[in-house]
Amino acid sequence: MSLYYDLHTHTYHSDGLLAPRELLREAQASGIRGIALTDHDVTSGLDEASRSARDFGVELIPGVELSVSWSGQTLHILGLRIEPGNPALQAGLARVQESRRLRARAMGERLARHGIEGAYEGALRHSRGIIVGRTHFARYLVEQGHAKDLRHAFTRYLRKGAHGYVATQWPGLDEAVTWIVAAGGLAVIAHPARYHLTAGALRRLIDEFKAAGGLGIEVVSGSHSPEDVERFALLAQEYALLASAGSDYHGPGETRTAVGRLAALPSGCVPVWSAWTA
Ligand code: AMP
Ligand code: MN
Ligand code: MN
Ligand code: MN
């Protein structure tokens, strides 16, 4: 068995396609040692995931991926090895879940003003959990023939500045890291290359993240190029951050990287799992 983890995955409890049990079955087939289930802003999939993990002999790391507003943009912060029942974490998540419901209604209204009817109801229909997100709108837009695939739905309707986009005030970086730490978890900056930050902004982000109690950064990610991996491996070493690896798997056909099928962390990185396997 591999000594490796995939620490970033989704199920239909947020915007993935699979049930937790189906995700764990795929993880087992990949030969990976363990996975973190990190659904967006919700922990409702973790019970089924941990039962299935026992059945399939895969280690489950309970996790979450928090939406955060920082310096005028949205970032994602992963919480790994969280205690899902923690009241501070759940109070924070309840607030984000409510923001998502309000945003979804506003997105539906904006899309209707641009000639797309029924998007709010359609997105809710595609959402199987308590979270509604842009991916659910994207699936509705594709289903109705407004876009040929998810990527086009985002570029035409859902990316920042597009007709269906509604800006949302997510929790601050400091707040999100505090909830994760309160829940006994380890905070990790998700897919850092996705934010296209300047070198200065990236350094400011890492300084603020570490000051808040953050400990890790994703170096290997389904959305990172080999150059991104090298770059963030060096940055992790320079800042003494633990290096994480995650596919960001959302389901068959929706992401390039399948669950558990990840490139190795570059040598010199301290893997985030050394925090619990050492
Ligand atoms: P939300 O958190 O509701 O704003 O939605 C963000 C999610 O949308 C991400 O976690 C991805 O799963 C998905 N997403 C963002 N950009 C794209 C894109 N260009 N193509 C496909 N999916 C995307
Ligand atoms: Mn997603
Ligand atoms: Mn993300
Ligand atoms: Mn993700």
Image (tube, rainbow, N blue to C red):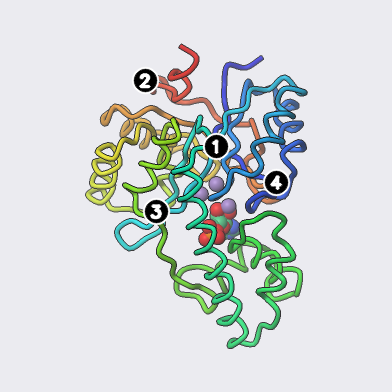
Circles 3 and 1: CB atoms closer than 8 Å: no
What's the distance in space between the residues labelled 1 and 2, CA to CA?
32 Å
Residue type of the residue flagged with mark 2: Gly
Q: Is mark 4 on a helix, strand or loop?
A: loop
Q: Nearer the viewer, residue 96 or 85?
A: 85
Disc with the residue nearer the chain's start (3 vs 1): 1
Q: Nearer the viewer, residue 249 or 92?
A: 92
Disc with the residue nearer the chain's start (4 vs 1): 1
User: Which of the two marks, 4 or 2, is nearer to us in this view?
Assistant: 4
Q: How crowded is mark 3: few (under 14 residues within 10 Å), some or many (20 or more)?
A: few
Instruction: Specify the farthest residue to the front.
Output: 87
What's the distance in space between the residues labelled 3 and 2, CA to CA?
24 Å
Residue type of the residue flagged with mark 4: Gly
Give x and y (percent) for residue 244: 46, 31
Q: In which quarter of the image is the C terminus?
A: top left
Left or right: where 102 falls relative to 189: right
